[in-house]
Image (spheres, rainbow, N blue to C red):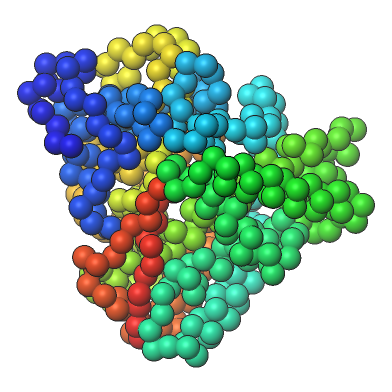
């Protein structure tokens, strides 16, 4: 839908309602509306897949403000809150797992889980991640000379990491992949399929949690149980289930998709790949820049406000659900020089790919470690890597809360 700039200028109430998510013309480019919205309609009315209306934020300062403001609730279980998806429950932001921890105890839980996700611990994991990437590339090359990088590397590596962190068998990774896809559905799966996946995942993890209580190991679930025991408390099973689900849907699906998008962005312009081959020290900043410039990050982060407020100079009434578009915010020219261009040397790079404030992504150090490890190994093993199809033929994944590519055909 095209935006009527004159109507926008006349005031937010007269602006047309956009269907959201906003479609883009290609897999690696952002919707043209992002620029127009940032310039003329920073608080835009949108219609979600559920049919409910919300307000879309696209400016960097506004998105950062809302994500850091404790008045904006992360859970959308209030009666007045917009439902995100077409299914009866309203999606992953509304379900029982999302409500497993009361808001007042969420920060305590984050501190406990955060002990696991330290940069030091993630750095210690890197050799094992690189070794697994090497094994997967060995298999890919043996079956070459072309491959779908998403299915050969982007999918199996993060799910192996998550299975290892949860202490479950990597042989169950196909189950984990299906569960994560289903639980992140906007329009792809029916309510019956979502309910079944939720029940299967809960049953699987409940059995695993019970076994872990009896025989703890060196994994996150064991650590959370031990930390609670040390404080004279019992970590509830539902909290552990919520932790496992958060790792599954955030730690696997988003990183899996980001591996494909990162490589696609770097290969779309061959000079970028050549620049990294010439200077491998740029891997870290290159990863951050692909995170910033990701034009297909997915739905965004919804928040619910129960009182009247103001965002970007626009009055926002109580009971409004707002959707923070980190992808649009990360291209804000008022924050980033040449915001629409990829600069592999960009530093500092205060992008919002992992959110902001007290609810920023707990697993961001893990995601960074995986992305840097994958890129380092690919540059070392496959310096001649290139896209096997024109970039215009790459297709986006549709119907899920997270954004990604349907496949990434490559050759070497």
Can I make out residue 373 in this image?
Answer: yes
Left or right of residue 183, residue 289 in this image: left
Q: Is residue 359 above or below residue 203?
A: above
Name the residue: 56% across, 62% down: 158
Q: Position of residue 389 (x, y in %)?
A: 26, 75
**For this rendering, which residue is in front, 105 or 23?**
23
**For this rendering, which residue is in front, 56 or 380?**
56
Name the residue: 68% across, 32% down: 100
In this view, which residue lies farthest toward the left?
Answer: 6
Q: Quadrant of the C terminus?
A: bottom left
Q: Is residue 383 above or below residue 98?
A: below
User: Which image quadrant for residue 3?
Assistant: top left
Q: Is residue 223 above or below residue 59?
A: below
Name the residue: 69% across, 50% down: 200
Q: Position of residue 396 (x, y in %)?
A: 33, 57
Left or right of residue 55, residue 72 in this image: right
Left or right of residue 245, residue 15 in this image: left
Q: Quadrant of the N terminus?
A: top left
Q: Position of residue 169 (x, y in %)?
A: 73, 65
How many marks can you see?
A: 0
Q: Position of residue 365 (x, y in %)?
A: 55, 53
Q: Is residue 79 above or below residue 221?
A: above
Name the residue: 48% across, 67% down: 154
Can I make out residue 365 in this image?
Answer: no
């Amino acid at each position: 839908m095209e935006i009527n700039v004159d109507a926008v200028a006349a005031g937010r109430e007269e602006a047309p309602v956009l269907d959201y998510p906003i479609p883009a013309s290609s897999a690696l480019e952002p919707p043209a509306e992002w620029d127009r919205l940032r310039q003329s309609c920073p608080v835009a009315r949108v219609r979600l897949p559920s049919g409910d209306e919300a307000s879309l934020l696209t400016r960097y300062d506004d998105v950062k403000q809302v994500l850091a403001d404790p008045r904006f609730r992360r859970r959308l279980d209030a009666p007045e809150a917009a439902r995100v998806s077409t299914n009866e429950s309203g999606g992953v932001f509304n379900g029982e797992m999302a409500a497993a921890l009361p808001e007042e105890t969420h920060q305590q839980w984050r501190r406990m889980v955060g002990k696991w996700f330290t940069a030091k611990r993630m750095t210690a994991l890197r050799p094992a991640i690189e070794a697994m990437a090497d094994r997967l590339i060995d298999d890919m090359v043996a079956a070459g000379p072309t491959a779908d990088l998403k299915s050969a590397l982007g999918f199996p590596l993060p799910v192996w990491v998550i299975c290892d962190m949860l202490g479950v068998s990597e042989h169950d990774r196909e189950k984990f992949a299906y569960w994560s896809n289903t639980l992140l559905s906007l329009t792809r799966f029916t309510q019956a399929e979502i309910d079944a996946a939720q029940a299967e995942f809960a049953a699987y993890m409940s059995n695993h949690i019970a076994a872990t209580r009896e025989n703890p190991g060196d994994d996150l679930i064991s650590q959370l149980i031990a930390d609670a025991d040390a404080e004279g408390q019992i970590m509830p099973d539902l909290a552990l289930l919520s932790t496992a689900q958060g790792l599954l849907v955030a730690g696997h699906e988003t990183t899996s998709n980001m591996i494909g998008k990162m490589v696609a962005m770097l290969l779309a312009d061959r000079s970028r790949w050549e620049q990294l081959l010439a200077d491998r020290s740029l891997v870290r900043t290159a990863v951050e820049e692909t995170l910033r410039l990701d034009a297909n990050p997915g739905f965004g982060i919804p928040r619910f406000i129960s009182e009247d407020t103001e965002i970007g100079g626009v009055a926002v009434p109580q009971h409004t659900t707002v959707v923070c578009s980190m992808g649009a915010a990360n291209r804000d020219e008022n924050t980033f020089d040449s915001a629409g261009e990829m600069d592999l040397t960009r530093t500092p790079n205060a992008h919002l790919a992992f959110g902001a404030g007290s609810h920023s992504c707990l697993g961001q150090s893990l995601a960074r470690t995986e992305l840097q490890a994958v890129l380092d190994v690919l540059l070392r093993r496959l310096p001649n890597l290139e896209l096997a199809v024109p970039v215009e033929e790459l297709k986006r994944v549709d119907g899920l809360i997270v954004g990604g590519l349907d496949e990434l055909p490559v050759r070497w």
